[in-house]
């Protein structure tokens, strides 16, 4: 479905990270996961890109989507499918 490039900053212990990945899996898309547990030095990068300190932080084609609640809201209003197919 998607030619969009998706990047998610995560921590393995984060239920919202897992929920975001389940939602994207259900859409049949793939993403690049940046685990802040495995790569803690990338936390500053995430904060600089997103302006937020919590995970997940989700980017679609370099556009900051936000966290899981933001991603889910986009899905509920139908905008996520459009973003993934653009």
Image (cartoon, helix red, strand yellow):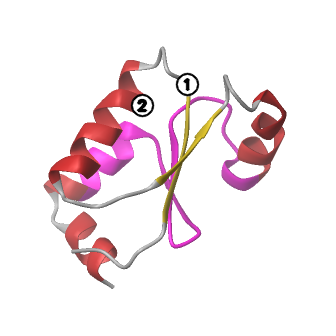
Residue 85 location, x and y as percent?
27, 80
Q: Position of residue 34 (x, y in %)?
A: 61, 42
Instruction: Give percent across and percent down for residue 47.
Output: 74, 42
Location of the C terminus by quadrant is: bottom left
Location of residue 54 (image quadrant):
top right
Question: Residue drawn 68% across and 31% down?
Answer: 53
Per the rendering, the mark at residue 44 is none
Q: Which residues are magenta?
A: 49-74
Q: Is residue 17 left or right of residue 53?
A: left
Query: Which residue is painted at 20% across and 56% down in the image?
Result: 75
Q: Secondary structure at mark 1?
A: loop
> Residue sitting at 46 percent across and 19 percent down?
14
Q: What is the spatial separation of the Cα atoms under label 1 and label 2, in whole angstroms?
A: 7 Å
Residue behind mark 1: 11
What residue sits right under mark 2 in the picture?
17
Q: In the picture shown, does residue 20 fall above or below 5?
A: above
Residue projecting furthest to the top: 13
Tell me, yes or no, whether the highlighted magenta stretch contains residue 3: no
Residue at 33% x, 39% y is 20
Instruction: Assess disc 2: are there few (<14), some (14-19) or many (≥20) residues with their C-alpha within 10 Å of its C-alpha.
Output: many
In screen coordinates, is 72 left or right of 34? left
Extreme residue toward the bottom, this view: 86
């Amino acid at each position: 479905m998607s030619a969009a490039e998706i990047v998610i900053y995560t921590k393995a212990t984060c239920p919202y990270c897992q929920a975001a990945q389940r939602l994207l899996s259900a859409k049949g898309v793939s993403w690049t996961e940046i685990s802040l547990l495995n790569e803690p030095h990338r936390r500053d990068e995430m904060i600089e890109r997103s302006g937020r300190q919590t995970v997940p932080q989700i980017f679609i084609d370099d556009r900051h989507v936000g966290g899981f609640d933001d991603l889910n809201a986009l899905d509920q209003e139908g905008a996520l499918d459009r973003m993934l197919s653009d």
